Image (cartoon, rainbow, N blue to C red):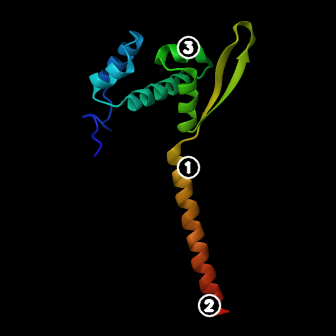
Amino acid sequence: METFPTNHRAKWTDCEFKTLLYEVKRKTPFQDIAVNHKRTIGAIKYKLIRYAIDEMKENDKEFSIEHLMKITNLSKEELLEGFKKLNFNYELEEFVPNNDIIVSRLDVIDNNLKQIWACVFTYVLIQFIIHFKTLTNYL
């Protein structure tokens, strides 16, 4: 049976998040950060990817992937894969002068909104089926 760290799925406190950012800035290894916070490495990386996304949304501007890598200590691949897993749309633009990549136009596709629409669609479909069967019974 798999055991999870003490803070598994626990809400992040402001203090804990600030500590995380401090540890990332000091380039503390993710394994050590995970132990310090009693969380998994995946949870730590997920929080940092969310942080990068929030930074882009709050500042409403383009960021170089290098900047995002610097503030999160994550690789380009980890960031882009994280954006994909979190259903965030982005465009990568090649920045010619230094071959950097710019992440721009980040459009949020909220999973909750997708789930709500799925529920609405399912409800409408069920109502249609019920009324269709009722209609066919009268014919």
Question: Which residue is rendered at x = 35% and y = 31% of the image?
Answer: 40
| Residue 59 circle label | none
Outermost residue, front side: 1
Q: Mark 1 — residue?
A: 114
Question: Which residue is rendered at x = 68% and y = 92% of the image?
Answer: 139
State which tag comes first along the sequence, 3 or 1.
3
Q: Mark 2 — residue?
A: 137
Above or below — where is 101 with respect to 81? above
User: Amino acid under label 2?
Assistant: Asn
Outermost residue, right side: 96
User: Amino acid under label 1?
Assistant: Lys
Q: Secondary structure at mark 1?
A: helix
User: Amino acid under label 3?
Assistant: His
Q: Mark 3 — residue?
A: 67
Q: Secondary structure at mark 3?
A: helix
State which tag comes first along the sequence, 3 or 2.
3
Q: Rounded to the nearest whole Å, what is the CA distance between mark 3 and mark 1? A: 30 Å
Q: Rounded to the nearest whole Å, what is the CA distance between mark 3 and mark 2? A: 64 Å
Q: Nearer the viewer, residue 13 or 31?
A: 31
In which quarter of the view is residue 121 placed? bottom right
In which quarter of the view is residue 106 placed? top right
Q: Nearer the viewer, residue 106 or 34?
A: 34
Q: Rounded to the nearest whole Å, what is the CA distance between mark 2 and mark 1? A: 35 Å
In which quarter of the view is residue 84 placed? top right
Q: In the visual, does 31 lie left or right of 112?
A: left
